[in-house]
Image (cartoon, grey):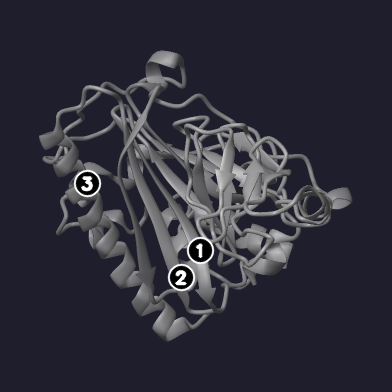
Amino acid sequence: MLEGLARRCWLPVAPSLIGARDTLGYALGKELLLTRNGTAFHNQCPHRGAPFVPCDKASVVRCDYHGFVFRKSDGTLVGAPHTDKATAARLRDSMRLKEVPLHRADPFYYAWLGEDDEAPPPPQTAHALPMPGPFRSVMALSLPVESAWHVLVENFCCWYHVPQLHAPSGLGAMSLPEDHFVVEDARPHDGLWFGTNPLRDSGGHPATQACSDTAEGLRSMGLFVAATPNAFAFMMPSHVFTCIVEPVSDTRSIEHVELFVHEGMEQEKIVKLWDFYNDVNNEDIAMCEAITKQRGSDVPDPKRTEYVLPHEEVTRRFHERIAAAL
């Protein structure tokens, strides 16, 4: 299902919050190599298919299998060990990294995997981040999940379940349904934005004063984006937590999660924050796995599904977009 969608929309493949760096992106079971030059390639040497290891310091990437060297700016072969001039010239003409169109719209990088002449306008960042950069990545993990990818994204879009499902982790008292609101989105492919205002402490008391959608207000509320179609991010005043959901099969996925903070956050606070997100995410995963076991890979028909509005408005919009794309 996602493969068909990915040919018709820009696909979130990696967090963009650190900016220019060599990193890996994930798209339909394949790795992408994103470079600090702003280019992206299939992470596969055209010689024998070996993957590259990201390296920020160099202007080239070197295959660890046979030592072939390619330029990051355009994927051109610039080094072929133990070859004469004629062979090296022939290889340069026939071997090149396969480039993928890449676009940055914080908090994600998006790749276009369809035909070049069919690409829609790329996504745009609809709102300022609650916490401007610079960021640093402090934790990252890839989690196998026995759940359909769209069930995981649907769960993120729903804040209605938080008080019930997340009571054990403490999030249930910190995120009340009446505190949430939908951010109107101008273009469908820019993602689904919603927020919570005010933010609450573990006792359910407002930890910040409710503010309007201004620069000051953004620093006191949480903003969330479900990036069409398979990624989401929690954007808070002190940190950002991102998740890219990579389908493995109709009922299995991999979550690529990463935590970003400002320089200067104490290690003890980082560990507590990561543990908290692990607890919350494990509660979500257990429920999504149970739903997938019962419902399979079917996407609910928005015309035949009951929604408790306004609490399930974002869920309804997500279902509508998936149905329209299919």
| Residue corresponding to mark 3 | 274
N-terminal-most mark, 1 or 3? 1
**Where's residue 232, x and y in %?**
47, 49
Asked which quadrant contains residue 136, the reply is: top left
- Examine the rendered structure and indicate whether residue 95 appears above or below residue 283: above
**Where's residue 82, x and y in %?**
64, 54
Q: How many neighbours does mark 1 have within 10 angstroms: few (below 14), some (14-19), or many (20 or more)?
A: many
Say what secondary structure mark 1 lies in.
strand
Give the residue at x 52% y 33%: 58
Q: How many neighbours does mark 2 have within 10 angstroms: few (below 14), some (14-19), or many (20 or more)?
A: many
**CA gap, disc 3 and disc 2:** 21 Å
Going by the numbered disc 2, the residue's amino acid type is Ser
N-terminal-most mark, 3 or 2? 2
| Residue corresponding to mark 2 | 253
Among all residues in the image, which is located at the extreme front? 84
Going by the numbered disc 1, the residue's amino acid type is Glu
Say what secondary structure mark 3 lies in.
helix
| Residue corresponding to mark 1 | 246
Asked which quadrant contains residue 241, the reply is: top left
Q: Is residue 226 visible?
A: no
**Where's residue 179, x and y in %?**
34, 38
**Where's residue 208, x and y in %?**
24, 24
- Examine the rendered structure and indicate whether residue 110 appears above or below residue 264: below
Give the residue at x 34% y 78%: 290
Q: How many neighbours does mark 3 have within 10 angstroms: few (below 14), some (14-19), or many (20 or more)?
A: some
**CA gap, disc 2 and disc 1:** 5 Å
CB under 8 Å between discs 2 and 1: yes
Task: Specify the label residue 46 is tagged with.
Answer: none
